[in-house]
Image (cartoon, rainbow, N blue to C red):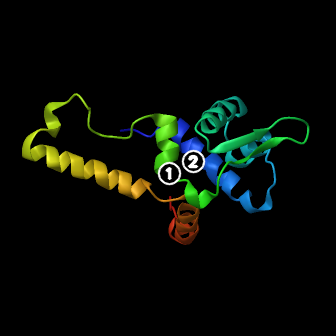
Amino acid sequence: MKITSKGRYGIKIMIDLAKYYNSNTLIKSKEISVRQNIPIKYLEQIINSLRKCGFVKSIRGAEGGYRLAKPPENITLYEILECLEGSLSIIDSKSDIVQGDAGLFWKEIDLKIKDMLSINLIEFMNKMENNKDFLMYYI
């Protein structure tokens, strides 16, 4: 399993939209692009996938834009990544690795990954905010 730029940018987009969820404000793709430093064409491709998965609503027109289709506490990172990346399992469904005792080990890892990514957008945003003070880089 590898999280690509599509998955990482998708989470950034969803967090950006989550910040405005309670204000019922429509957010333009250009605004998200500038704030999150995501190329506009790539952002529009990603947001279209998120819309197809039912996470984002779009309103056309001069006053149009995007907003979350449901509350951010009802959307998990796992769901977003699965929408954008496909299966997040580290186990190939056709592999014989899931057979026998060793299979339990690999299945457990798979479950732990899913459990860690089952954090909703609000919890993730809070966790990022709380850890911001600890993310200090020195050169």
Residue 121 can be seen in this image = no
Q: Residue at x 31, y 55 (%)?
A: 112
Up-down: is 54 above or below 120?
Answer: above
Percent position of residue 47, x then y: 66, 37
**Residue 11 - label:** 2
Residue 65, position in %: x, y?
Answer: 80, 42
The residue under label 1 is which amino acid type? Leu
Seen in the picture, residue 119 relative to 45 is either above or below; the reply is below
Question: Furthest residue to the left?
Answer: 100
**SS assignment at label 2:** helix
Three-letter amino acid code at the position of disc 2: Ile
**Can residue 38 be seen here?**
yes
Q: Residues within 10 Å of mark 1 (few under 14, many from 20)?
A: many
- The disc label shown at residue 38, or none: none
Q: Position of residue 78 (x, y in %)?
A: 46, 49
Pointer 1 residue = 77
Which residue is found at the position 52% from the left and 40% from the top? 7
Q: Is residue 16 left or right of residue 121?
A: right
Whether the residues at callouts 1 and 2 have beta carbons within 8 Å, the answer is yes
Is disc 2 surrounded by few (<14), some (14 to 19) or many (20+) residues within 10 Å?
A: some
Is 63 left, or right, of 138 in this rendering?
right
